[in-house]
Image (tube, rainbow, N blue to C red):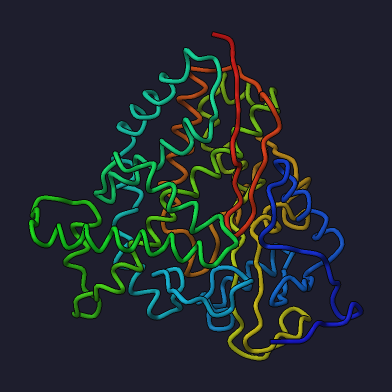
Amino acid sequence: MAGDPTPAACPIEDYRTFGPPVPALTSFERMDGYQDRARPVLWTRDTPGYWVFTDHDVILDGLQQPDLWSSQVITPTEPDPPFQWIPVMLDPPEHTRWRQLLGGYFTPKRTKAMLDEQRRLAAEIIEAVRPKGECDFVRDVARIFPATIFLQIMGMPVGKFEEFMEWEEKILHSSDNDVRMEGMQLVMGYFAGLIAERRADPDEAATDIVNTALNWEIDGEPVSDADLLNCMLLLFMAGLDTVTSQTSYAFLHLATHPGDRKRVTDSPELIPHAVEELLRVYPIVQTARKATRDVDFHGCPIKAGDMAAFPLSAAGRDASAFPDARRVDLDREDVRHLSFGAGPHRCLGSHLARQEMAVLLAEWHRLIPDYELVETPTEHGGGVWGLDALRLRWDV
């Protein structure tokens, strides 16, 4: 690892990947400040010491160079993780083979085929809270909707939802490595039992991921049980967390910006565009990489083994890439963003995530067009930012 660079070579900031809960949007405001003071990169002494890139084009360049920036890590605070989530922690060409294997489950055609059922499910969830005049949107809506869809895609029991969410919380939102490992072991133990159960009693007609994964092959060879479990673990985390967090920030914005809320309500055809703009302004994933060799990267003296954060929140809110970048503008013409990542590891489920967000925005504003924030929520950091709760109320 490189030693601390001098301030003359690189600004040093008190950047932290993990920390205590803070008022909602504080993490974004802090990132804005880092970007204003340190471009294109800063150094943090947050253990073990790592680079944080703050410029849109530099982040894009890094994510498109897997030969230089390896994905074998998840957070910049853990340079040698004792686990390997497949395929996100693989580099090409191994990553490419797995992505080809998984790609068919998340195609635009397959995603669109789920649309009517997703609309029905969203309306059912919203109708359950509408008579109450108030809800915790995170707990009562944003967690349930995408998780139910994901569990159905995976072939997992919806009845174990709460237990699954407890495991996910341990893995993704704890800074304690022991707690994270405990969560992973619980998930992998569950999948080991489920896979054994499906092998003992196969359903040839089933099309869910767990059933079809039993016959997966790469280069003509069956996928090992260890690799299969690591892949199931990754899908579990991605399916139960990211859309929940992203949708919650979208609704926080709309609850506090009545003009944007009215436009979405009055013109539902605007919603797909609004989803893209909300994704751009509130990117929740703050990804990390590990340098594979010594190199000068945009003036930064990288050494092999150096850790780096490539926060997508900085990329989406960079005024050098988007005019007035930190403001949601539903009339913005260019909303191309990096909120699903870039390069070979760009989010495989982006089509599904977009559709789920659009469906939830459309159905909610059809049924509850006017609402407000009850109190300022708190948010958690880590590799995926999210709101701890989002209390909304409306007239009944």
Q: Number of labelled discs?
A: 0
Foreground: 169 or 126?
A: 169
Foreground: 357 or 228?
A: 228
Q: Position of residue 325 (x, y in %)?
A: 75, 48
Q: Position of residue 288 (x, y in %)?
A: 60, 69
Q: Position of residue 157 (x, y in %)?
A: 26, 44
Q: Residue at x 33, y 63 (%)?
A: 188
Q: Residue at x 19, y 59 (%)?
A: 212
Q: In which image quadrant can residue 158 be found?
A: top left
| Up/down of 289 relative to 337, above or below | below
Q: Residue at x 64, y 49 (%)?
A: 380
Q: Position of residue 81 (x, y in %)?
A: 51, 76
Foreground: 138 or 103?
A: 138
| Up/down of 34 relative to 356, above or below | below
Lateral position of residue 283 relative to residue 272, left or right = right
Foreground: 51 or 14?
A: 14
Q: Residue at x 36, y 49 (%)?
A: 108
Looking at this view, name the residue that lies furthest to the top: 396
Q: Quadrant of the C terminus?
A: top right
Q: Quadrant of the N terminus?
A: bottom right
